[in-house]
Image (cartoon, rainbow, N blue to C red):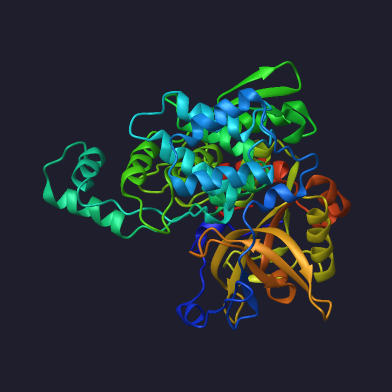
Amino acid sequence: MVSVQINNVNPYLKLSPAEMKSLSTDSSTGTVSCDTNNTKKIYPSFQAASSVINVRTMLTPEENQKYETVASVLNKKDKKLLKMALKSGLLLRNDAEDRTTVLDNLHKIITTPRVKGLDADKIAQSVLETIANPSIITQRFGDIPNIVMPKVIDYMTADSTDERERKLKEAEFNEMYSGCCVAASVEFNLAHRHPAEFARFVEGLTSPAVEVKKTINLEKLSKNTLDAIWLLNAFEVPYELNGINQATLTLKPDKEAIIRARIQNNYRDPLERSSIDVLMQSMLMQLGTEQTYTSLLDIRGGKFSREDKGLIDFEKTFIESVVEDKDTTSVVYQTVDENQRVIGQEADYQTIKSQLLEALEMGKNIIIGYMITDAAGVIENAHEITIIGARKTSTGETIFICNDTDDDIPFPIEYSETYLIPKIHHAGLPTSIAEKSLDLTENWQIAMREFEEYLKSDDKNIAA
């Protein structure tokens, strides 16, 4: 089965200017609507805590000391966020790999050294704001201010004094767009579903080591241990085996990520990535591109893609499986030919709908890749978003609640089923769901093997 290589088309999709102009706000309901059969809604903060059993809101004496320490470095607004996080049960969530809570990791951020150039109070603030409303996570790069641009150009040109070379390099920054939609979606998923683990990742990535350790069960990558190890080696992830069933991975952003993170620490503008967004997304891009990502220019190498932007579907599935230590399979729904034209569906409408709803009923978010085509079916735009819920209208139509990291609107977006389902190219589903229709599903581990062999051949070089 041949699937589209997302990187061959524009890696981000936004509302058109006409659609943005058509947005209207209903102040009584907090709903923003446009005339394209999709709606955008503001949802309550701290929504993730609502589905948690045994929510804990009372501090132990030791936790109270940590709470006061964290509160002491926060401004008035952020102290309110901290209080709301406690009351909602979010602050004492202990869904991190090491069973630490959000509070434990905030306290560690405040009381232990951070990497040079990042402020602990700003990091703690970003963590609180992000877990309160994960939809503020964005893939949008921050601009490089004039005051620091010369130093960045010095770094990029090895201190060249050639003005033409320096101007060309500066022009690259001015023409950049973000190919981090997959990484931002995985970051969102972590913050939305596992806030304590998100906070643990942030603590590690902002520490002087600029890394986080992640222990995974090898069976989450493949039922065959040797295949799982093959995957780790194929992605060139530093790891140590723990017996025969587990491995501890070392996850790091690329070396240039800290430059962008420091800039965002000091010069962040509205709607731009935070410092923690920079480090999280750069780490995820490194993980998915065999350690070849370059943060300053948002380009990648690696053996699985011939393009220099973004991630393709099985790279996305790999990083998703690692970060959540969950068994995920990329289910391909569209057939795409070598001319980037959608020529058919690999599953019928009802099958796609039922698989999506079943995953949501299991409490899973679903990262999907969807396409916009022209009248002839040729792909014009592609993007990754996350389905986080669904509801039914009074007429029985299903509305999918989604998060988009590139729409500049910090709350979920709703798409009708008739609008979204025909556009879905692939979806990351629990393997237990995907296995029910193997004739419709290409196993992503097998796809990677076939792809690697295909690249060794003298035939056409297209993503499989």
Q: Is residue 174 positioned above or below 297 on the image?
A: below
Can residue 457 be seen in the rendering of this structure?
no
Residue most extreme to the top? 243
Examine the image and state in which quarter residue 346 appears: bottom right
Q: Residue at x 66, y 44 (%)?
A: 87
Examine the image and state in which quarter residue 300 appears: top left
Q: Is residue 226 positioned above or below 12 on the image?
A: above
Q: Is residue 441 positioned above or below 315 on the image?
A: below
Residue 21: image location, x then y, percent: 47, 81
Is residue 269 toward the left or the right of residue 151 in the image?
right
Residue most extreme to the right? 436
Q: Nearer the viewer, residue 163 or 22?
A: 22
Is residue 150 toward the left or the right of residue 341 in the image?
left
Residue 179: image location, x then y, percent: 47, 54
Is residue 203 toward the left or the right of residue 354 in the image?
left
Q: Residue at x 54, y 44 (%)?
A: 128
What quarter of the picture does the N terminus occupy?
Answer: bottom right
Residue 228: image location, x then y, percent: 71, 30
Residue 151: image location, x then y, percent: 21, 41
Can residue 2 be seen in the rendering of this structure?
yes
Examine the image and state in which quarter residue 158 appears: top left
Is residue 76 toward the left or the right of residue 370 in the image?
left
Q: Residue at x 56, y 32 (%)?
A: 67
Q: Nearer the viewer, residue 303 or 258?
A: 258
